[in-house]
Amino acid sequence: MSHERLGAPGSSIYSHDPQYGCQLNMTGSAITNGMTERMGYITRVQSFSACHRLHSIHLTDEDNIKVYGKCNNPHGHGHNYKVEVTVRGKIDHTTGMIMNLTDLKRCIEEVIMIPLDHKNLDKDVPYFANTASTTENLAVYIWNNMMKAIAPNVLYEIKIHETDKNIVTYRGE
């Protein structure tokens, strides 16, 4: 970020950030109308259970077994997924919140719990009809649907714990 250096009363040094049209103090917090705008993150954790079979329609049956091993079991297998949904934004001066947690909880219920909990991902979720139901693709699915449910530029990260040792993080990139 390029900043114009501006002097300010006292010992604080401020700079002007032309991208945002506001002043930044030494901590990088924006200053608008004399009030510091603080950025924050909220993470809400939700668990759900689902089953799936790792299988790609783009591979032969033999290749699917080579790539996915026991996770290619024709009868599938299940997980108790733990999903962390993180939002980022300015902390509102009036409410003290980035986003109302009640609204975030409702979005998670609609995007994650209703369509995914106690479901067979491959058979019950149309997105996975032609997309392998890997945890990476599950993170993309959740991201895409959360983006439709919350305000623009607020969603920061989806993190899914498939097991205690396997964790996938997706930030829309």
Image: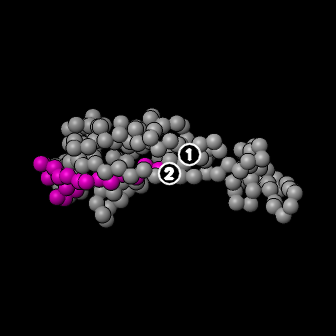
Taking the magenta stretch, the answer to whether it contains residue 72 is yes
Q: Give the SS element for disc 1.
A: loop
Pick the front one: 156 or 108: 108
Q: Give the SS element for disc 2.
A: strand
User: What is the CA distance from the residue labelled 2 to the residue labelled 1?
Assistant: 7 Å
Q: Residue at x 28, y 60 (%)?
A: 163
Q: Residue at x 20, y 48 (%)?
A: 51
Left or right, 102 with respect to 132, comes to right
Tell me which amino acid carries mark 2: Ile
Residue at the limit of the structure toward the left, as seen here: 75
Image quadrant in which you'd find residue 169: bottom left
Tell me which amino acid carries mark 1: Ile
Give the residue at mark 1. Answer: 98
Give the residue at mark 2. Answer: 42
Span highlighted in magenta in the image: 68-86
Q: How many marks?
A: 2
Q: Is residue 64 visible?
A: no
* Picture quarter with the N terminus: bottom right
Image quadrant in which you'd find residue 142: top left
